[in-house]
Image: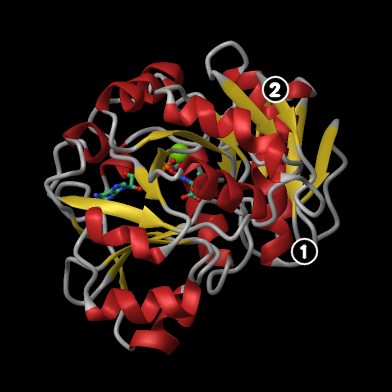
Amino acid sequence: MHIKANPLDFKEEQLLPAAAVLQNGGICAFPTETVYGLGANAWDAEAVAKIFRAKGRPQDNPLIVHVADPGQLSDICIVTPLAETLISRFWGGPLTLILPKTDKVPAAVTAGLDTVAVRMPSHPIANALLRLCGLPVAAPSANLSGKPSPTRAAHVLADMDGRADCIIDGGDCLWGVESTVLDLTVSPPAILRPGAVTKEEIYGEIGEVIYGTGVGAPKSPGMKYTHYAPDAPVFIAEGPDAAARIAEAAKAYTRPGVLYYDCNPPALPVAISAGNTAAEYAAQLFFALREFDRQGADVIFAIPPAAGGMGDAVRNRLFKSAGGKII
Ligand code: TXA
Ligand code: MG
């Protein structure tokens, strides 16, 4: 089932079939302000298992539970005072909180962890769907496992047509990178995945906050898997002479591509602009990675934005997609 809905002008009736899919144990792709999600009733372990099958997702990578209202949380997790503060400042919006789970949340959702990730989106279609189905909805990004997260309906159709019971086309996602994941079960609170709610903003609200490091076992199981990988290999190039180094390295390829930022791009067969700000870069990034594949690039050279603010989220995804390859 396909539903097309304009986020600024839709009727709730349009979403009723999608809500019914969720209520009946099916899986439904829906837009959020970050990326598209692939949702199932979080109370229903069998419905949740369908998500893992549709994505080809490893069983040990837990899902985020989405709610329409913070009042739903008492069934799902223990809401600490710190969580209350962050919720009143940043929800609905791109901030996911890791909190101690209740017994009611199936192990399939949390991959057996005793913590659960929760988030309330700000996207009008996501929120209406969550309200209409009346359920907490477990949802990862709606891509095939390992691929860039979908930021446009066409990406969802490419990856999930025939796999999801319902796909809601709600246009392009605003932020373009997934939510910030903040672990509140450790002290100081640790950002496990940078996103549109920045470290600086969280610091402004609660004081101490750190980036979770890669030391020891990955704290967020999702961090250990290959991510955001287009078909072509990705190389990162930084520094004032990045464009010149890219031009040189590109000679070894037949159809090289460049994702350029803050420079005059080298003249390569496929050149995509990442915009002029870190936020524009974020909104372009996953689209661009898929676009290089579509245009048949055999290599992708990417110039990252500077660190800090939203630049951290973009750099995190870019370096993961490059898998450590730097020129
Ligand atoms: O913006 C988003 O967060 C999107 C939209 C659809 O809401 N969702 C999303 O979900 O990106 P997913 O599954 O692609 O990423 C969830 C991340 C993974 O890295 C996972 O390992 C981590 O959150 N995670 C989930 N539950 C966790 C937990 N209990 N402890 C630590 N990390 C957890
Ligand atoms: Mg994902």
Residue nearest the observer in this picture, 259 or 5: 5
Measured as percent of width and height from the top left, residue 50 is found at: 38, 19
Q: Residue at x 43, y 42 (%)?
A: 324
Q: Is residue 57 above or below residue 98?
A: above
Mark 2 vs mark 1, CA separation in Å: 39 Å
Left or right, 72 with respect to 169, comes to left
What is the three-letter code of the residue carrying label 1? Asp
Residue identified by numbered label 2: 2
Q: Residue furthest top?
A: 162
What is the three-letter code of the residue carrying label 2? His
State the quadrant of the C terminus.
Answer: top right
Residue identified by numbered label 1: 262
| Crowd class of label 2 (few under 14; some 14 to 19; many from 20; radius 10 Å) | some
Q: Secondary structure at mark 1?
A: loop
| Crowd class of label 1 (few under 14; some 14 to 19; many from 20; radius 10 Å) | some
Identify the image quadrant of residue 14: top right
Describe the colour scheme in one phrase: secondary structure
Q: Residue at x 17, y 68 (%)?
A: 186
Measured as percent of width and height from the top left, residue 312 is found at: 51, 64
Disc 2: residue Cβ within 8 A of ligand 1's nearest atom? no
Left or right, 14 with respect to 104, comes to right
Q: Is residue 214 visible?
A: yes
Comes first in the chain, label 2 or label 1: 2
Q: Is residue 323 above or below residue 32?
A: above
Q: Secondary structure at mark 2?
A: strand
Residue nearest the observer in this picture, 268 or 32: 32
Residue nearest the observer in this picture, 130 or 273: 130
Q: Is residue 199 above or below residue 224?
A: below
Q: Residue at x 30, y 74 (%)?
A: 83
Identify the image quadrant of residue 162: top right
